[in-house]
Amino acid sequence: MTQSEAIRSVAAASRRTRHDLVALRTAEAARRAEAVSEARARAGVDEAALRRAREAWVASLPHDTAALWLALCDVSDPELPISLVDLGLIYDIRRVDTHVDVDCTFTASACPCMAFIKEDIRDRLLEEPNVSSVQVHEVWDPPWTVERMTEEGRAVLRGAGVTV
Amino acid sequence: MARTTTASVELDGAARTATHDLILSLADSKRLLGMRYAEWILGAPELEAGIACASMAQDEWGHARLLYALLKEFDVDVDRVEHGREADEYCNMVALDEAPDDWAGLIAINVLCDGALTVQLEALRASSYVPLRQRVGKLLEEESFHAAHGAAWWRRFASASDASRTALHDAVQARAGDVLAWFGPDGPGARTLIGASVADGAGSTLRERFVEKIAPLLASAGLGDVFTNIEPSFESFEEARRRPHGRAPDRATIQRIRGDRNREFLMD
């Protein structure tokens, strides 16, 4: 095997690894959902107050993109047991016919999970009816801070021992 | 309020060129700086310091990535800029050309080079060039941790012993002139950036801001007059590249930065 053949085979294996990773992450998401509910119990979360806050938030969503915001509530951050919406990474969602644009930021300028997060956003929104294409735009203004997290997100992280 | 520009094509010719040059010099400097931090992830005097170097290296490469991406707007082949240039095409701060050979040198780089880059970024907070301004806030927020790290170690060097103070003096004096020169002369490029409100200061104005900013640290180490006694040299200095003609960062560093040995393994 020549060196270039060896390199090509490693690159192919890397691509296969990526597919395996997707399967692993699906399993991880299920495990995480369980951990989240345990964390909430440990943190003594006031579920009624959070439910009221969430209902108010849902009622405030724009009519044409409400379902899309709710869909992104299913997408967990790759490193923290809360959704991208609760983490405050989603800045805006716009829909034109069946095309969706999402403005999204990251907690750090060198976030190593950027590609995963963008891919997860795209994959989840493409599951929604009447969505045929999704473009994720990176935005940095205003910069993300913990202030952008929802109360629910904070409650869960506190339960997991993260100071926010 | 100054007129704002959302696309580089709306900048007039000279302003567009000067903005491109500024972004490239910032990005290249941050890339080299990230490498200099990374070289100390193992071998720093404390485990915590090594971890801090890992975080700072990550930040600097993140900043470089965001800045290089902006160059797409200037019709630049960003892939070539990131992975195809030779060492002598880099536009980084000269003081980052060589790896520091001791921890005092790394701390001098942390305070002086990282500090100078931050002063330059602060001058862009209200930039008329919106895509740049929109990134600067995030970068500066992350930079505040680098400044705290540098200041803490600087004070330890300054107060620990005569030997540590001497090591810090030597490291600072070896780099002071190059750091001051990096802000550039008050030449046509500097005037263009200010005239177009891309930056609210350039050249000597930024030099003064920088020296004023680090004055308390300099005083704490008995280095109060180091910078005031230096007249930056602009002999054979290329204003666009913000460095003297004919000098280049070491090739081994550039080969690692470009990822020459790993390119074929990229998945995308």
Image: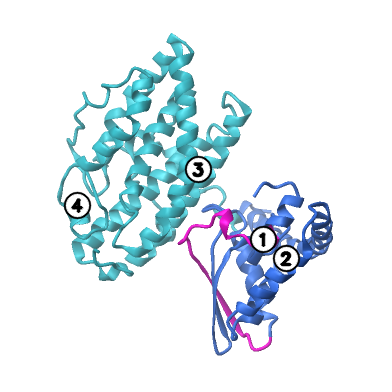
Cα distance between the residues tagged 3 and 4:
31 Å
> Is label 1 in a helix, a strand or a loop?
helix
Q: Position of residue A138 (x, y in %)?
A: 51, 65
Q: Is residue A96 above or below residue A87?
A: below
Q: Are marks 4 and 1 in contact (CB under 8 Å)?
A: no
Q: Which mark is residue A151?
A: 1
Mark 2–mark 1 Cα distance, whole angstroms, equals 7 Å
Give the quarter of the image for residue B75.
Answer: bottom left
Q: What residue is at 30 percent from the left and 58 percent from the top?
A: B127
Residue B230 belongs to the span the image colors magenta: no
- The kind of residue tagged 4 is Gly
Mark 3 and mark 2 on one chain: no
Q: Which chain is cyan?
A: B
Which amino acid, mark 2? Leu
Q: Quadrant of the N terminus of chain A?
A: bottom right
Residue A34 vs B107, above or below: the answer is below
- Write down the residue under mark 3: B256
Q: Are dots 1 and 3 in contact, CB under 8 Å? A: no
Give the image location of residue B81, x and y in percent: 39, 55
